[in-house]
């Protein structure tokens, strides 16, 4: 299932807020080092440098998050004002149909591959092994997919898998 750019951006902003939370944990370690080691020691100097660098990174990440939230708010406001798109995949029912077809095809492909491997290893009885994974069956499956896509979506395919092409070894 693909996600929108908006959903990806929102997830990225949330992840960066979690990074600032991790910065707080690192800052606590540096504070502990500052309290533990004498002022003229190397660990104390390292903790001072770490604290300064951490504050700089924290402010940069936090500013970026604030900026991105403002951009997302602006994009949401703009999207609310825009007229709805007239597209066949926008309603919930169409999305459910696409997800169901995609899940069925993934399941069918998985079993097709599994049965074809069993046939190749001669692990299937002869009456089962005969017609599995043949070029004709695969072509029939592709035609069936195209017919479903044409009837539901008005197009041959949804830009998914490339058609299977058989190249006989004696012609290669």
Image: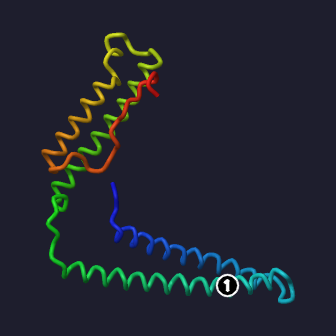
Q: Is residue 161 above or below residue 46?
A: above
In the image, residue 157 lies at what x, y percent?
A: 24, 47
Q: How many discs mark residues in the rendered view?
A: 1
Horizontally, residue 89 falls left or right of residue 161, namely left
Residue at the location (75% across, 85% down)? 35
In the image, residue 91 lies at what x, y percent?
A: 16, 60
Assess disc 1: are there few (<14), some (14-19) or many (≥20) residues with their C-alpha within 10 Å of its C-alpha.
few
From the viewer's side, name the closer residue of 132 and 19. Answer: 132
In the image, residue 99 lies at what x, y percent?
A: 25, 49
Q: Quadrant of residue 28?
A: bottom right
Q: Quadrant of residue 5?
A: bottom left
From the viewer's side, name the closer residue of 160 and 164. Answer: 164
Q: How is the image coloured?
A: rainbow
Q: Is residue 31 above or below residue 129?
A: below
Q: Residue furthest front?
A: 171
Horizontally, residue 8 falls left or right of residue 44, namely left
In the image, residue 51 lies at what x, y percent?
A: 68, 85
Which residue does the numbered mark 1 point to in the structure image? 53
Residue at the location (43% across, 21% down)? 118
The quadrant in which the N terminus is found is bottom left
Q: Residue furthest right?
A: 40
Residue at the location (35% across, 24% down)? 133
- Secondary structure beneath dot 1 equals helix
Residue at the location (47% across, 18% down)? 121
Horizontally, residue 136 falls left or right of residue 125, namely left
Q: Is residue 33 above or below residue 152?
A: below
């Amino acid at each position: 299932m693909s996600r929108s750019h908006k959903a990806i951006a929102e997830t990225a902003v949330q992840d960066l807020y979690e990074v600032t939370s991790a910065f707080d944990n690192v800052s606590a370690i540096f504070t502990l080092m500052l309290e533990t080691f004498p002022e003229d020691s190397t660990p104390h100097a390292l903790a001072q440098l770490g604290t300064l660098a951490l504050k700089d990174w924290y402010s940069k990440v936090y500013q970026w998050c604030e900026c991105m939230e403002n951009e997302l708010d602006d994009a949401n406001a703009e999207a609310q004002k825009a007229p709805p798109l007239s597209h066949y995949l926008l309603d919930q029912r169409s999305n459910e149909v696409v997800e169901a077809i995609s899940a069925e095809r993934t399941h069918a492909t998985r079993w097709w591959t599994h049965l074809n491997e069993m046939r190749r290893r001669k692990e299937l009885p002869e009456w089962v092994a005969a017609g599995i994974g043949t070029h004709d069956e695969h072509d029939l499956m592709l035609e069936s997919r195209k017919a479903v896509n044409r009837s539901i979506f008005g197009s041959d395919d949804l830009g998914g898998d490339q058609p299977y092409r058989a190249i006989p070894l004696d012609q290669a």
